[in-house]
């Protein structure tokens, strides 16, 4: 629903662009995440393609005005398809000197820089460890600098409401947002609606935030501060109904969908951990779908309660990040041994240990593949984009119940919090996967397997005649009785491995994007998809023969992967780790693949990929 | 409906499996197994609705010998697994078999949280004050200065009192029995079975290999009546070979042991109230055994069943939300929030 017509007419010069990258940066108390999300929502509703990068500190409120307290939200919106939040930014909104200092290096020359000049006093500069005022020392001359007294102007817009100074100052982010809406000719309506809903029980705050928003918009119009405004027409996306979707939200919706498609109750056992907690927040709202969420006493109880729920016949999941994943390790082995369906989400973050709780990384791949005692293979899937999390959640559940295995989903902080437009699927297009519990006592044996999938029966307690015992001790095939015989153990280890390997029969052959054969194949997984897609497009436009294979299935790997690797002269594996998929590919396929590795808590920039690709092509 | 259509009543044999029991000959676990197999058929519950869950340790082999649904999980985690089972299937009768190491050391966290939530699970804690399966290290209930394989110069930890811990977690049912007191044990198990909320039963159990005689002072025939006091709801706290001693309240709220005579009679004694809504009195009782001259209580310390079960509350909340909002419409959920159409 385009709202272009509702935008007030403007007399200034208007320029049509095909894309822009905007970053809101301020103190973690300045509401930058909300401001960024609002702009994102408005851009998405208008029909632009979008990619976002929220980047915030682990501390809820680091000391105000300091470098560690800086929170940022970057949005790339375009009339074309976008794949990344953008390398360099066109517009930077800096609410204080610290935010300016942290972010200004990414601003393009001649880029628009809006600063809150009210927070550039001596004390503010000191907190940001600045010795001179950048607004006065000409260090910002290469940018189009707009010094705006955000606090004073916001207060002036709100002075008649009788709010205290602190409450008025808390609205300044909406003043800045109003300015950005003017700059990009956007309707304020979606944000006005959001404000009305968000503060519906606090009419004074509705009024204050609306006035601040409109104050910012009118300020630009009245002062003609910007001589130019921009228009970025809607993108030509595949027809359909869209909404903006983040990775964690998509996982939650995927699990609810899987619950309905399988006819199973959804049970989530979870312990709060950044950046996975939002999945728990989201699913705990869906009680009307029969979803049962259990905030356990620790990570171990989170997974073991889910194992109990799965044993009792639920579609059970547990959601965590790397440190929690480490704690769940022993229970994962139990799930492997008792062969029950379970989905484990690891929303990766920087490590080791507590590491970088709010920053992204892809360094849990080997943990997911191998991080258990003994031979304990588990299927591993990875989502490539925020919206892809929806489909990965459904596929993980389908594999789990079909093969009676735990399945690990790898997402990461970037996917979890990043958003993109999501074409809402038709429910009828998503296949059902009804589950049949064992019920016939005559032929029942706990470890008698389906010849096609090697799955054992799912025999839930309460079923007459199916009383049986399972546990972590080695089982006799197929009775499930305790058995320590050497050959039985070897057989069971091999059968469990064969069962996971059999999942490959459900994985379609992979086809690289770009050139089907050529000089270079980029093989990757997870959240790097966007940057690589952008780089691939740019490089191929220059005539380079490159393919890009983005793996969703990391265990088992697609059956034709080895053959695809041979069609290219060189193989590049970019990862936000020290080379974990690289290690797997080299070991498994004896391919002389090369890594591009970045471990900075941030996604790849397209330029970093371009440089490596050109280096490998000898350019 | 003629009586011919009724299934034959269940017997002890129906709860025995064909698996060879692998506890050491003379182990107290045999007596506990036998008591449980005797009590289960009397509960009027279908066999397929029993689930026995355990962690790791000698006691945790229990499920393999019970012909019910059984889940031998990992060390310390049985209460959490059982919570997941109960959440999804509140109708099932879930019993956890655990030991002093499993429940109070590696699994201490799950034990206290299960109890505070009042999940409708029966927990049998086999307390032999030793690590048996790993061949003889001290446990969290071992007495101070215990010499074991891992503490040749004596252990330095103060022991947990499992009953105090359970009451401190505000468990709604807390009881103690002894492996060799078969009659008392069965009665205690029946009391536990009748409780809807979390039922915590400590069973003093002899490990004849690594800690033989740990409870002899309570179980030897001569000592028994002097050192053990049986708690029975509504009855005064009397003990002694001649039943001439008892527990009396002191003016400061504490308790003391008194000898009958000199004007002291049974009517001066504390009358046991297991149904008190607050746990303070039961906690006071749980500390008796640590005090010189006091007996060790067995029986039901606390049985207050007015607190709703966690699994019921969980499921009720879902029903309430559905009643208020109607059953969820997935199509609507996927289309929730701001959407836009691309043509």
Image (spheres, rainbow, N blue to C red):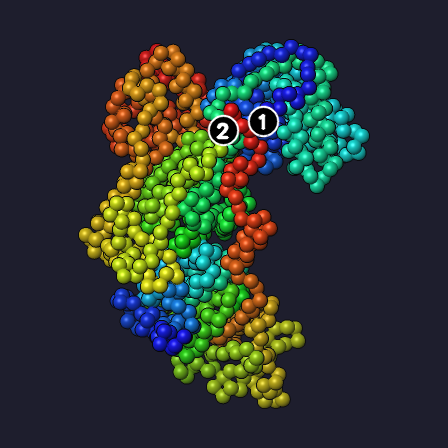
**What's the CA distance linking mark 2 and mark 1?**
12 Å
A601 lies left or right of A447:
right
Q: How many labels, in total?
A: 2
Callout 1 environment at 10 Å: few (<14), some (14 to 19), or many (20+)? few
The quadrant of the rendering that contains the C terminus of chain A is: top left
Q: Which mark is residue A1?
A: 1
Residue A57 appears in view: yes
The picture quadrant where one finds residue B216 is bottom left
Q: Which residue is mark 2?
A: A240
Callout 1 secondary element: loop
Q: Is residue A189 above or below residue A264?
A: above
Residue drawn at 40 percent across, 52 percent down: A310
The quadrant of the rendering that contains the N terminus of chain A is: top right
Q: Is residue A393 above or below residue B24?
A: above
Residue drawn at 24 percent across, 50 percent down: A492
Callout 2 environment at 10 Å: few (<14), some (14 to 19), or many (20+)? some
Give x and y (percent) for residue A151.
Answer: 72, 25
B262 lies left or right of A589:
right
The picture quadrant where one finds residue A232 is top right
Residue drawn at 54 percent across, 28 percent down: B341
Q: Which mark is residue B176?
A: none
The residue most toward the left is A487
Q: Nearer the viewer, residue A607 or A350?
A: A607
Q: Are marks 2 and 1 in contact (CB under 8 Å)?
A: no
Give x and y (percent) for residue B264.
Answer: 61, 86
B281 lies left or right of A239:
right
């Amino acid at each position: 629903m385009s709202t272009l017509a509702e935008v007030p007419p403007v007399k200034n010069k208007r320029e049509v662009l095909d894309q822009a990258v905007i970053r809101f940066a301020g103190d973690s108390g300045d509401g930058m995440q909300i401001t960024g999300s609002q702009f994102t929502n408005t851009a998405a509703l208008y029909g632009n393609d979008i990619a976002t990068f929220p980047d915030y500190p682990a501390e809820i409120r680091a000391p105000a005005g300091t470098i560690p307290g800086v929170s940022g939200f970057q949005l790339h919106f375009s009339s074309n398809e976008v794949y990344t939040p953008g390398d360099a930014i066109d517009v930077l909104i800096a609410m204080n000197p610290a935010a300016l200092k942290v972010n200004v290096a990414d601003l393009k020359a001649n880029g628009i820089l809006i600063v809150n000049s009210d927070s550039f006093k001596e004390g503010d500069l000191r907190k940001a460890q600045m010795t001179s005022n950048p607004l006065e020392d000409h260090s910002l001359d290469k940018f189009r600098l707009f010094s705006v007294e955000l606090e004073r102007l916001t207060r002036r817009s709100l002075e008649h409401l009788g709010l205290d100074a602190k409450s008025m100052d808390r609205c300044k982010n909406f003043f800045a947002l109003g300015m950005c809406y003017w700059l990009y000719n956007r309707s304020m309506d979606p944000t006005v609606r959001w404000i009305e809903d968000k503060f519906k029980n606090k009419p004074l705050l509705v009024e204050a935030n609306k006035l601040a928003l409109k104050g910012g918009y009118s300020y630009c119009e009245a002062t003609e501060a910007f001589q130019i405004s921009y228009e970025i027409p809607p993108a030509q996306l595949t027809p359909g109904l869209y909404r903006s979707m983040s990775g964690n939200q998509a996982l939650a919706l995927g699990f609810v969908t899987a619950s309905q498609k399988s006819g199973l109750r959804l049970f989530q056992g979870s312990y709060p951990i950044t950046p996975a907690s939002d999945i728990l927040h989201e699913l705990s709202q869906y009680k009307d779908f029969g979803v049962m969420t259990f905030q356990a006493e620790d990570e171990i109880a989170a997974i073991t309660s889910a194992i109990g729920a799965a044993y009792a016949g639920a579609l059970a999941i547990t959601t965590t990040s790397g440190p929690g994943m480490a704690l769940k390790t022993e229970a994962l082995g139990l799930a492997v041994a008792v062969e029950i369906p379970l989905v484990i989400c690891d929303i990766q973050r920087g490590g080791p240990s507590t590491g970088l709780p709010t920053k992204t990384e892809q360094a849990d791949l080997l943990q997911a593949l191998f991080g258990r005692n003994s031979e304990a293979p588990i299927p591993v899937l990875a989502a490539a984009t925020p919206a892809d999390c929806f489909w990965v959640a459904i596929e993980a559940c389908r594999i789990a119940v079909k093969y009676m295995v735990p399945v690990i989903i790898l997402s990461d902080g970037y996917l979890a919090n990043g958003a993109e437009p999501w074409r809402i699927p038709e429910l009828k297009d998503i296949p059902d996967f009804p589950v049949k519990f064992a019920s016939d006592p005559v032929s029942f044996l706990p470890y008698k397997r389906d010849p096609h999938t090697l799955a054992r029966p799912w025999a839930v307690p309460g079923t007459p005649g199916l009383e049986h015992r399972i546990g972590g001790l080695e089982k006799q095939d197929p009775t499930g009785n305790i058995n320590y015989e050497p050959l039985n153990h070897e057989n069971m280890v091999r059968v469990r491995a064969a069962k996971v390997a059999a999942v490959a029969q459900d994985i379609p052959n992979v086809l690289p994007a770009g050139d089907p054969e050529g000089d270079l194949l980029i093989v990757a997984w997870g959240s790097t998809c966007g940057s690589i897609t952008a780089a691939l497009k740019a490089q191929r436009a220059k005539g380079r023969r490159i393919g890009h294979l983005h793996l969703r299935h990391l265990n088992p790997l697609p059956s034709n992967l080895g053959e695809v690797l041979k069609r290219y002269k060189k193989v590049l594996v970019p990862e936000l780790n020290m080379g974990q998929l690289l290690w797997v590919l080299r070991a498994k396929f004896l391919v002389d693949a090369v890594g591009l590795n970045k471990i900075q808590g941030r996604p790849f920039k397209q330029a970093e990929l371009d440089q490596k690709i050109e280096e490998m092509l000898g350019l | 409906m003629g009586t011919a259509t009724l299934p034959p009543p269940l017997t002890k044999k129906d709860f025995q499996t064909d698996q060879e029991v692998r506890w050491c000959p003379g182990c107290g676990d045999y007596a506990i197994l036998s008591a449980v197999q005797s009590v289960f058929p009397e509960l009027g519950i279908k066999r397929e609705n029993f689930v026995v869950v355990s962690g790791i340790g000698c006691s945790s082999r229990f499920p393999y010998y019970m012909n019910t649904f059984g889940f031998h999980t990992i060390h310390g985690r049985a209460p959490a697994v059982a919570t997941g089972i109960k959440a999804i299937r509140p109708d099932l009768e879930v019993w956890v078999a655990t030991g002093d190491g499993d429940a109070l050391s590696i699994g201490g966290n799950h034990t206290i949280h299960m109890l505070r939530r009042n999940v409708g699970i029966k927990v049998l804690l086999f307390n032999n004050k030793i690590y048996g399966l790993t061949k003889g290290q001290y446990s969290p209930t071992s007495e101070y200065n215990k010499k074991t394989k891992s503490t040749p110069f004596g252990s330095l930890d103060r022991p947990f009192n499992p009953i105090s811990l359970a009451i401190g977690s505000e468990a709604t049912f807390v009881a103690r029995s002894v492996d060799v007191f078969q009659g008392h044990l069965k009665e205690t198990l029946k009391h536990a079975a009748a409780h809807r909320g979390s039922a915590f039963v400590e069973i003093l159990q002899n490990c004849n290999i690594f800690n033989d005689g740990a409870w002899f002072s309570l179980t030897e025939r001569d000592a028994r009546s002097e050192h053990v006091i049986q708690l029975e709801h509504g009855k005064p706290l009397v003990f002694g070979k001649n039943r001439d001693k008892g527990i009396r309240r002191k003016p400061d709220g504490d308790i003391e042991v008194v000898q009958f005579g000199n004007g002291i009679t049974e009517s001066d004694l504390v009358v046991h109230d297991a149904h008190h809504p607050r746990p303070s009195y039961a906690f006071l009782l749980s500390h008796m055994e640590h005090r010189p001259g006091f007996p060790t209580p067995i029986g039901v310390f606390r049985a207050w069943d007015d607190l709703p079960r966690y699994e019921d509350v969980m499921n009720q909340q879902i029903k309430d939300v559905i009643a208020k909002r109607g059953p969820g419409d997935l199509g609507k959920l996927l289309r929730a929030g701001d959407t836009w159409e691309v043509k």
